[in-house]
Amino acid sequence: MKTLTPLEQLPLFTTQIKAFINWTRKNALWPLPFGTACCGIEYMAVVGSHYDVSRFGAEVVRFSPRQADLLIVAGTITEKMAPVLRQVYEQMPEPKWVLSMGVCASSGGFYRAYHTVQGIESIVPVDIYVPGCPPTPEAVIQGIMKLQEKIAKGDTPSQRLLEKKKMAERSSDQVQSVAQGDSH
Amino acid sequence: MEYHFQLVQQLKEKIGADSILREEKSNWNPNEYILTVRAADIRKICEFLKKQKGFLWMMDICGVHYPEREENFEAVYHLYNKDNNKRIRLKVPHKEGTKIPSITSVYKAANWFEREAYDMMGIFFEGHPSLTRILCHHKFVGHPLRKNYSATANQVLDAPEVFEFPPMPPPHNDHEDILTNQRTVLNIGPSHPATHGTFRWFVELEGETIIRSKAEIGYLHRCFEKMAETHKYQQLLPYTDRLNYLSAPMNNSGYCQAVERMLGVTIPLRAQYIRVILNELSRVIDHLVCIGTTAVDMGALTTFWFCFRQRENVYELFEKLCGNRMLTSITRIGGVYGDLDEDWKRQCRGVLVTLRETVEEVDKLLSNNKIWLNRMKDTGVVSKEMAVDYAFTGPCGRASGIDYDIRKAEPYYDYDKFDFDVPVSTDGDNFARYYLRLEEMRQSIRIVEQALNKLPDGPTTISNPLVVLPPKSEVYSNIEALMNHFMLVIEGIKPPKGEIYSYSEAANGELGFYIVSDGTGYPYRVKVRPPCFPIYSSFEDVVQGGLIADAVATLGQFNVIAGELDR
Ligand code: SF4
């Protein structure tokens, strides 16, 4: 007769599927650097050999919005650029996050001017603001880590929206199946 | 003076006595003359100056708005003759709505400059091939640099502009290959890694060959020149960092130099040397980034890591000196902020050693690399004539055989006391630009070494209470100094009434500042002559007939920096 191994001796742990998915999401961020100005250059330093953001699982830089889930807006966004930014954001698959790097992206910075968007909040929803002109690479990394915390909690608008959509789908499925059952 | 006199005489004979309205001398530059001319004659005058007098370079065109004058607009042209190092500034006062003859038929560089003057000021140039907006978006209404346009009046754009090329007869080849016998129209950018995130090209291809192209800029137009008019002279300094953000100290020093020349002050020798050290260090990192990013665009990622590792070292030096890594705002009008101590100098010497090693490493990695050679040799060729016509300066100009470096032609900051060479190539292709940059880095490292060794003692700012803030210890203990501080902060530095065109050799070429002062603490008008603006204006011509992949290499080696291109 075999004796069953007690559960705590197995290399197992219990979790919720949701938490597990969030954990994978948080550690495999694929950023799309929307670098337009000086902050974009500093973002290169974040990815570069010295600061090496791959230690935090966010180094697979993709320039195609369809392959990315983190939009890093690094640099001043002008009125001419705004529709482009919107389009890029819309092309990204859900769930997606936005990190606004630098004061220009966050609030227009010291360019209170006729051709500068006064904060990208009016174009795309932002999850994390990183202040600085330019922010130091450490600050950007901290921003990414803070975002990871939020993602782990499932606490970002994009995740909540996705959750809601799924719920809606599920309940409509149920309604449908009930309806189908009735017809039988 | 003789030369000037003769020139004006000849102009009056050729064009007509009443075409020259006024003659002036520049108050700081003995080589520059200022002529106010009649609007209708500007093309003839430019033609004469170019063909007969050797003013081959058209450096800049800008507009100035004087609402209180009868002739309320002024178009300002800057011409340069390299052979005898003379400059002419032509001022064309005119009433709003007057059509000024376009000089695009004389100088190719005028094309984009005239478009900019139209966009910013609403000056009309008659005979311009396509006088459309260039920096502001296509639905923008009004002209933002006019004095009556508010700096905060944003105009929201809903969708990007859609281009269309005018129709053209289909290609004449009956090639089997479907790719070569029909044309494809392609939009690249602005959010595309090869266009550095801020440029947009619209190209028509036959196979992979570019038949027609259109380069659109303005995606980073963040209104530097309007900001200049709403800030005091000292407050403008951090904005200048953000022109060419790869080599911020050079913009700082170029701007401060312009204001200092206006004020007629000379900064202490030690400050000059510190500026030289910072400028040359930033020239090195600027070139490193240029080569590194071009290499990435070509698929050579290793070089990028090599270059960026070194750049970090230099940034550490900057950070130690002023607290910011990249956008240093290190100079002040009247000197520099902070001072170099022994520790800094020691560290700097160490960095120079590793910098030199990196330059050699990059040289070894790329210069004999077959792929690199195939991609760079004979691509993006710019002949000398074309380079002159498009007012190339800096490394791109020197790669096309223009032996012009302001550090040698008109030495400032004691540059004549340093032992360095200016490399020149005649190939004019991308490889020449790359190789020349390598050599320039070696020369810059030499300059920094010499400057560190020769660094004189003394103060780092002048002690003119109308220009420089008193030291903080004084401000806290002495009522005079406190008042002085207060006045300078509230009122600002007030250069005398007048105007100046000041230039210095930045990483990309001649960085010019045209400043008009009305005697108050705020500049009346600041026009930057960004070195890569005229260079990039040649892009459509240069890439025509080449492969699309070569256009990427050309853009990288032109080292177009959106910050200074769009301002
Ligand atoms: S926040 Fe500062 S560094 Fe970043 S893009 Fe704006 S001006 Fe440049």
Image: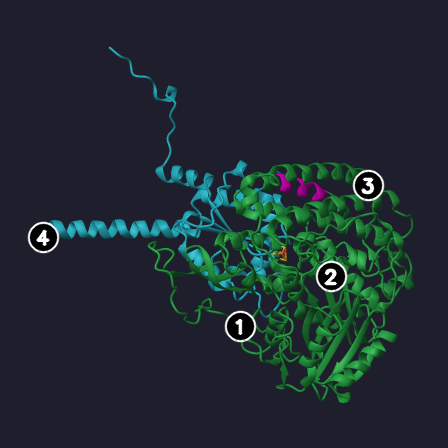
Residue B315 drawn in magenta? yes
Which residue has dot 4 on it? Answer: A183
Q: Which residue: 37% across, 55% down?
A: B179
The image shows residue B192 at horizontal and vertical percentages of: 49, 54
Disc 1 to disc 2: CB gap under 8 Å = no
- How dense is the environment of label 4, judged by Cα within 10 Å: few (below 14), some, or many (20 and up)? few
Identify residue type, mark 3. Lys
Q: Are marks 4 and 2 in contact (CB under 8 Å)?
A: no
Kind of residue sitting beneath label 2: Leu
Answer with mark 3 or mark 1, whichever residue precedes in sequence: 1
Distance between mark 2 and mark 3 Cα atoms: 25 Å
Image position, residue A177 (x, y; %): 17, 49
Reading the image, the residue beneath label 3 is B345
Q: Give, as a single range, the part of the protein colored magenta.
A: B306-316
> Which residue position holds label 1?
B155
Same chain, labels 3 and 4: no
